[in-house]
Amino acid sequence: MSAPLPQKGLGPGVLPVMPHQQQPQPGMPPQGALREISPVYLCRIGEETVQDIVTRTMEIFQIARATQLPNGVTQSQPAYQDRFGKLQEHLRQLTLLFRKLRLLYERCVEMTPDLQESTAELVPYVGEETTAVRVEPCSPAVIQERQEVLEKVRQKNQEMKVLMDQMRNLLWDVNAMLTMRK
């Protein structure tokens, strides 16, 4: 048995095909990692699924836009059947994608029960009392960096205030000169 020839032009992350090896499907984790799928990975799959849903929906609207209204003009039956078949296929795919998205969502909720927040916590309603937000202590390096950024912002704000005052005075002088000319 001879060794497989090296393949040119393979980019990073692309494995050459080895004989008698099962290739992992794109978008799927390696077989050993199936038990340890992280919520981040599931969210990435969910993001791709949402993109597929948007693409399919756009294709449905393009098919609908290209379809003529029944205004007395007879359209060929094969063209109608072809468009109808494409539309049915896109709708079927959309249904499957929404089911997949629902499963991904439910799996993420199962894996992250401590991260679940109610909508009231995320967006408070007018008139409702807000609950205290828990703040975790930061490291001293983060606190120091924050102080430095705040000081830079204060300095820039002071510079902008000086410039605005100078512009205001300049405009005042220009307006005074213009009124004296008249």
Image: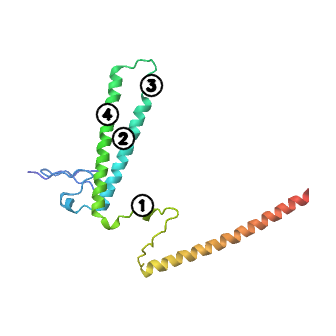
Amino acid type, label 4: Gln
Residue 27 in view here: yes
Q: Quadrant for residue 104, please give it.
A: bottom left
Task: Name the residue beneath numbered marker 4.
Answer: 88
Label 2 – label 3 distance at C-alpha = 22 Å
Q: Nearer the viewer, residue 149 or 108?
A: 108
Relative side of 143 to 25, left or right: right
Q: Position of residue 167 (x, y in %)?
A: 74, 65
Badge 4: how crowded within 10 Å, few (<14), some, or many (20+)? few
Do the CB atoms of the residues marked 1 and 3 lie less than 8 Å apart? no
Badge 4 marks a residue whose secondary structure is helix
Asked if marks 3 and 4 touch (Cβ < 8 Å), the reply is no
Disc 1 vs disc 3: which is toward the camera? 1
Q: Amino acid at mark 1?
A: Thr
- Residue position for label 2: 56
Which residue in the protein does label 3 denote? 69
Q: Are marks 4 and 2 in contact (CB under 8 Å)?
A: no
* Amino acid type shown at disc 2: Arg
Q: Secondary structure at mark 2?
A: helix
Q: Does 154 sit left or right of 58 as displayed?
A: right
Q: Observer-nearest residue: 77 or 161? A: 77
The label nearer to you, 2 versus 3, is 3
Mark closer to the chain start, 2 or 3: 2
Q: Residue at x 52, y 64 (%)?
A: 127
Q: Residue at x 43, y 29 (%)?
A: 66
Task: Name the residue that disc number 1 marks.
Answer: 119
CA gap, disc 1 to disc 3? 43 Å
Cα distance, mark 2 to mark 1?
A: 29 Å
Q: Position of residue 106 (x, y in %)?
A: 29, 56
